[in-house]
Amino acid sequence: MAIREIIILPDKQLRLVSKPVETVTAQIRKLADDMFETMYDAPGIGLAAIQIAEPVRLITMDLAKKTDEERQPRAFINPEVLSASEEMSVYEEGCLSIPEYYEEVERPATVRIRYTDLDGKVHEEEASGLFATCIQHEIDHLNGVLFVDYLSKLKRDRVLKKFSKAAKRAAG
């Protein structure tokens, strides 16, 4: 396992649409292991493979936030939203690729998802609450969408400008 570098806005790779995983291989399992280690180190509750510059449809997640809570690592391969509730909910979201920026985002309160696990088994389940928000946020990453895309144009432009300036300063 290895901690990988998380790419940061305005990196153009964050806008790529990730490719489906054809088969669950040892390489995909190793990538998931690296993603869990990277996510826990960050620390975060979800990570899409594209955030470590791997454009494949793989997500890791663990909603146990507190260090004393037992870890509940989950991997989602080729996840998709099958249906979404009309009822909406608002959560304050953040993103490991947009560090230290948080904003309230409105999303469907409940979604039905289908995904493949690391053993190659296909599952369908209903997600609500934080799980629904997180899985939608991460699936968006696989489609090149960031949570800031849900904000007003003014707020979105402000955060994009801030991160573009920071990247230019870092580049020297």
Image (cartoon, helix red, strand yellow):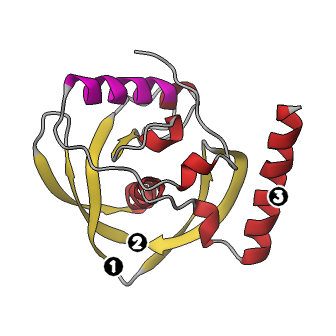
Residue drawn where x is 20% and y is 34% of the image: 118
Residue drawn where x is 83% and y is 33% of the image: 171
Q: Position of residue 31 (x, y in %)?
A: 35, 27
Dot 2 amino acid type? Ala
Q: Where are the magenta residues, as a range?
A: 26-38
Q: Dot 2, how many residues are within 10 Å of its Cα: few (below 14), some (14-19), or many (20+)?
A: many
What's the CA distance linking mark 3 and mark 2?
31 Å
Q: Which residue is mark 1?
A: 85
Outermost residue, left direction? 121
Q: Which residue is mark 3?
A: 161
Q: Dot 1, how many residues are within 10 Å of its Cα: few (below 14), some (14-19), or many (20+)?
A: few
Quadrant (top left, top right, bottom left, bottom right) of the N terminus? top left
Position of 107 relative to 44 (above/below)? below
Q: Dot 3, how many residues are within 10 Å of its Cα: few (below 14), some (14-19), or many (20+)?
A: some
Of the residues under marks 3 and 2, which one precedes in the sequence? Answer: 2
The front one of 114 and 57 is 57
Name the front one of labels 1 and 3: 3
Decide if residue 8 is on the left or right side of residue 16.
right
Decide if residue 3 is on the left or right side of residue 124.
right
**Magenta segment: does it hold 19?**
no
Quadrant (top left, top right, bottom left, bottom right) of the C terminus? top right
Residue drawn where x is 25% and y is 44% of the image: 21
The residue tagged with tag 1: helix, strand or loop?
A: loop
Decide if residue 24 is on the left or right side of residue 36.
left
What's the CA distance linking mark 1 and mark 3?
34 Å
Position of 165 relative to 5 (above/below)? below
Name the front one of labels 3 and 2: 3
Q: Which residue is mark 2?
A: 109
The front one of 95 and 153 is 153
Dot 1 amino acid type? Ser
Of the residues under marks 1 and 3, which one precedes in the sequence? Answer: 1
